Image: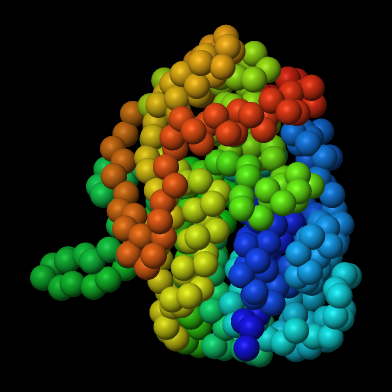
Amino acid sequence: MKKHILILGGDGYLGWPTAMYFSNRDYKVTVVDNYFRRNACTELDVGMLYPVPTLIQRAKIWYDLTGKEIKVVIGDLTDPELMRALFDGTIVYNWAVNPEFTGVPETVIHYAEQPSAPYSLINYKYANITIKNNLLVTNNLMFAVRDYSSDTHIIKLGTMGEYGTPNIDIEEGWIEIEHKGRKDRFLFPRQASSLYHTTKIMDTDLLWFGVRMWNLRVTDLMQGPVYGIETEESKLDPRLRTLFNYDEIFGTILNRFIVQAVVDYPLTVYGKGGQTRGYLNINDTLQCVHMSEITPAQPGELRIFNQIMETFSVNELAEKVCNVGRSLGYNVRVNHIDNPRKEAEDHYYNPTYQGLIEIGVKPHYLTKKVLLEMFQIVEQYKENVRTDVIFRGIKW
């Protein structure tokens, strides 16, 4: 029997590649999205590197090329009734080859969140949107699984930003503490650096509650910033490529730097550039969710993995982009600008991240070849880049 994967946020930077990845491996796949990211880009006038077909159009292209169906639901998952319909069999698909209910999912991959720290701090209205969306979707999912399919495995995308930059090693989600002669195991202390990251802490706490109260099974992937464009599946047709932002609101740092290098825009290094984080290739995100699905958490378990493959400072990333860009003939420059964010620029950072490798993930590392391939794709769309949207200086 084919397993059914439900992907919440299936139109996004990670959601669509994940949908194709599982479909290509003969899973039954259903995706849900409300086009939040696309609509926010239009509202904020930040655009994308290249045009991307709608989710329904992409599912049709995928079916025409592979003969494999990805069922599509367009809707807002902050509505609890829509979430519950995905489990009770009353859902109506916006596109499907076979419109019959696929069945209760064995696994739900939860990407359906407002994903941007700068967006969450534009002003109080965008803060409210972030809190409302992220917490309600997670809460609705938790109750739907409890009420209809308590054995369903929830894979939730967390963020390494939940931890902040503590002056101790960052363990994988949990830490043992001895206090006044007694010991216990606690969620690792967290100190988010934005309102978005704070909602991700709250997501973890919501699901930890569901695990303790109702024996839910949850894997929480504390992911670092992702880079990359192409995946195995998107190589079939450029129209299948994922969303790609290069602005400060939705673009991840390495993706932004490469676009900046191609259009002769000085790399925007915030402050001294000593901020160190963990990073991973988009192809490793796909591996991580797949390996987590194959080896699910147990009932009553909140399993946490730190989803990164290597660490770099901002300066180190800038240097890599400079070296590759200059080898291609670009006059890549670095501009250290006043840091718009309130964050430590010189800090200790030593996270543990062996758990995913132990369950079978084989890392892709940030090599010159990887950077060259990204440069080559960005170069194809150089004329689409608007330098006025690259940096607007959202502060907090």
Q: Quadrant of residue 133?
A: bottom right
Query: Is 44 located above or below residue 223 in the figure?
Result: above
All told, the count of numbered labels is 0
Q: Quadrant of residue 9?
A: bottom right
What residue lies at 52% left-to-right and 67% top-to-bottom?
Answer: 290
Query: Is 40 located above or below residue 255 in the figure?
Result: below
What residue lies at 85% left-to-right and 53% top-to-bottom?
Answer: 54
Query: Is 333 located above or below residue 34 in the figure?
Result: above
Query: Is 78 located above or below residue 42 in the figure?
Result: below
Where the N terminus falls, by quadrant? bottom right
What colouring method underlies this structural image? Answer: rainbow
Q: Position of residue 287 (x, y in %)?
A: 50, 60
Q: Is any part of residue 167 visible from this angle?
A: yes
What residue lies at 25% left-to-right and 47% top-to-bottom?
Answer: 168
Where the C terminus falls, by quadrant? top right
Q: Position of residue 269 (x, y in %)?
A: 51, 22
Q: Is residue 312 left or right of residue 241?
A: left
Q: Is any part of residue 55 visible from this angle?
A: no
Q: Nearer the viewer, residue 244 or 155?
A: 244
What residue lies at 61% left-to-right and 53% top-to-bottom?
Answer: 232
Q: Nearer the viewer, residue 145 or 177?
A: 145
Q: Position of residue 311 (x, y in %)?
A: 37, 40
> Which residue is outermost to the left?
181
Q: Is residue 368 left or right of residue 379?
A: left
Q: Is residue 308 left or right of residue 104?
A: left
Q: Is residue 72 left or right of residue 308?
A: right
Q: Position of residue 140 (x, y in %)?
A: 67, 75
